[in-house]
Image: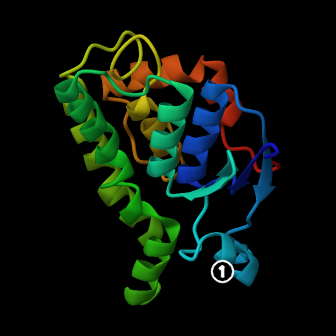
Amino acid sequence: MGGAVLYDYWRSSASYRLRIALNLAGIDYTSVTVDLVKGEHKSPEHLARNPQGFVPVLEIDGLRLTQSLAILDYLDETRSLGLLPKDPGQRARARALAHSVAVDVHPVCNLQVAKHATALSGGAEDMPKAWMQHFIRPGLQAFEALLAGFRQEPYCTGETPGLADICLMPQLYNARRWEADFSDLPRICAVEAACADHPAFAAAYPAQDS
């Protein structure tokens, strides 16, 4: 079936999630850049891979998979990553924690959305940054409050990295990019430090030449 191929963009939060998970699983993969700035995600070639025109797309095990959260579920189930607790109630709570940023904050902070909002505003110069800050900080404040229901040992929900960590770290990258301060959120800061020290997260960090 050949090796795994990740259609990727270095600054894509969803792609960043998958790079972390692939590293955690120890899966060797080939990264193929789909340059969002150049519009390559709208090319016929990429639309044939994913009609939504999004990254990431992962080719693995003879499958072509889209939607990062669905792909994370697949990797968790087939590679036994232990991204979520086994108890159904705890599993639902941990998934809700992850989805609070991946489903509620990330989509509205997609640069394509922010650019459209900027256009509708008449092209206000500071609109993208203001838009991002408006959504990112409250989202992280809510995440911090939700974290109080878990023991950070040292990751979001326990001793090993989980789905919430994988979803949080790309959002923190974006927070720093758009100067949305979270330095007063101690649980998040502690999780960020733990993840930054983990080789799988460090190797996945966005690098423009990737």
Which residue occupies 42% across, 33% down? 163
Count the marks: 1
Q: At which x and y percent is residue 184?
A: 31, 29
Label 1 crowd bin: few (<14), some (14–19), many (20+), radius 10 Å: some
Q: Secondary structure at mark 1?
A: helix
Q: At which x and y percent is residue 75?
A: 54, 37
Amino acid type at circle 1 is Lys
Q: Which residue is mark 1?
A: 42
Q: Quadrant of residue 135?
A: bottom left
Which residue occupies 66% across, 80% down? 42
Which residue occupies 44% across, 22% down? 82
Q: At which x and y percent is residue 141?
A: 25, 39
- Seen from the viewer's position, the closer of residues 94 and 137 is 94
Which residue occupies 58% across, 23% down? 196
- Seen from the viewer's position, the closer of residues 46 and 133 is 46
Drawn side of residue 204 relative to residue 168, left or right? right
Q: At which x and y percent is residue 45?
A: 75, 77
- Seen from the viewer's position, the closer of residues 181 and 161 is 161
Q: Quadrant of residue 122?
A: bottom left
Drawn side of residue 9 relative to residue 129, left or right? right
Task: Determine whether 12 is above or below 171 in the image.
Answer: below
Q: Residue 178: tell me if it is visible.
A: yes
Drawn side of residue 3 relative to residue 126, left or right? right
User: What's the image's color scheme?
Assistant: rainbow
Q: Residue 126: tell me if it is visible.
A: no
Q: Quadrant of residue 119?
A: bottom left
- Seen from the viewer's position, the closer of residues 143 and 76 is 76
